[in-house]
């Protein structure tokens, strides 16, 4: 009986909500989309570039849950595509209650060896993609005095590490943008929360820049459902940032409090990892 009550409560948590997830075709975004669908959302809008992966997820969702599913192939790094997506979704659905800006990727390697175009591509997807998607739905959320934006950052938004400069910079930017915007949104009825996980077992590390190896892939890496739980909690939270797992917050606090001790340790570990990879040859330890 108790279990039944808990289950019903969970199912109704997002009742009537229209949820849009970017980067829904894989990893964290896929799990988040499944979990919102299983918790009573009215409609789920799945956004990513890969139509076939979105169609596959759409089939899985409609097999399991009674929810309206819309797929929208879109490259979030392209402003015009995002603007068109925003217009069409607002025409079709009227509004979006929960926007999960999750699309993103990492490129591993030294700044010296990366092209400007590579660095730009990370910035355009991970940071400007969040800005474009936020801008297309923000007016409507503020006009309705309702809505929540959840931005996926990373613990890389608090630690700059060797081999991931563009990625870390993009996530610092997401955190800074989110912190400022959440101050502006005070009293509007619209919320904003950042979710910052440490390493998660997804396709993220399959990018060829990681050289076919998965740095730091170990037992400490999170499962997608752990991060998804944090994203669903974030959609109803007043907090600015949820770090996953929670104890990593202590690491962030230590880094800001005693950087002269923490930075050399982090520096040593990540430089060693970079120097072991093909891309990190000749990196000073
Ligand atoms: N995995 C980790 O260790 C980790 C840790 C902290 C934070 N994160 C963050 O979590 C988010 C999700 O990553 P993940 O781990 O789930 O990786 P993933 O499995 O590789 O998924 C990335 C998703 O982003 C989409 N995407 C990438 N570029 C896009 C673009 N230009 N336009 C639209 N969609 C795009 C991909 O879909 P398409 O290829 O179909 O477009 C895919 O659905 C990212 O923001 C990542 O930075 C990951």
Image (cartoon, rainbow, N blue to C red):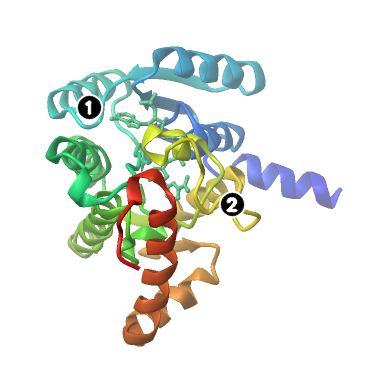
User: CB at mark 2 closer than 8 A to ligand 1?
Assistant: yes
The residue at 59%/38% (across/down) is 39
Q: Which of pointers 2 and 1 indicates the residue nearer the eye? A: 2
The residue lying furthest to the right in this view is 1
Q: Does residue 193 appear in this view?
A: yes
Can you identify the residue that label 1 sits on? 86
| Residue toward you, 58 or 175 | 175
The quarter of the displayed image where residue 274 is located: bottom left
The quarter of the displayed image where residue 79 is located: top left
- Real-space CA distance between mark 2 and mark 1, rounded to the nearest whole angstrom: 32 Å
Left or right: 227 in relation to 90: right
Q: Does residue 22 appear in this view?
A: no
Callout 1: helix, strand or loop? helix
**Percent position (x, y) of residue 24?**
44, 30
- Please tell me which of labels 2 and 1 falls first in the chain: 1
Can you identify the residue that label 2 sits on? 222
| Residue toward you, 97 or 70 | 70
Left or right: 40 in relation to 219: left
């Amino acid at each position: 009986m108790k279990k039944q009550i808990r289950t019903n409560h969970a199912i109704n948590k997002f009742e009537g909500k229209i949820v849009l997830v970017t980067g829904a075709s894989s990893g964290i975004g896929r799990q988040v989309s499944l979990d919102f669908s299983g918790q009573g959302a009215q409609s789920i809008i799945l956004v990513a570039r890969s139509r076939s992966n979105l169609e596959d997820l759409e089939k899985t969702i409609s097999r399991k849950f009674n929810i309206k599913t819309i797929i929208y192939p879109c490259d979030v790094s392209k402003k015009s595509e995002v603007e068109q997506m925003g217009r069409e979704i607002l025409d079709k659905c009227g509004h979006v209650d929960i926007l999960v800006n999750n699309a993103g990727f990492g490129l591993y390697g030294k700044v010296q060896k990366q092209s400007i175009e590579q660095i730009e591509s990370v910035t355009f997807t991970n940071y400007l993609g969040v800005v474009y998607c936020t801008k297309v739905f923000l007016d409507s959320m503020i006009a309705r005095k309702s809505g929540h934006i959840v931005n996926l950052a990373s613990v890389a938004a608090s630690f700059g590490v060797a081999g991931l400069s563009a990625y870390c910079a993009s996530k610092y930017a997401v955190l800074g943008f989110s912190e400022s915007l959440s101050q502006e949104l005070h009293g509007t009825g619209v919320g904003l929360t950042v979710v910052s996980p440490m390493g998660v077992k997804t396709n993220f590390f399959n990018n060829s820049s990681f050289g076919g190896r998965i740095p730091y892939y170990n037992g400490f890496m999170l499962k997608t459902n752990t991060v998804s739980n944090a994203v669903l909690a974030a959609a109803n939270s007043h907090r600015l940032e949820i770090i996953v797992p929670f104890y990593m917050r202590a690491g962030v606090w230590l880094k800001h409090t005693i950087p002269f001790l923490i930075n050399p340790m982090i520096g040593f570990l990540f430089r060693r990892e970079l120097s072991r990879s093909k891309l990190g040859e000749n990196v000073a330890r």
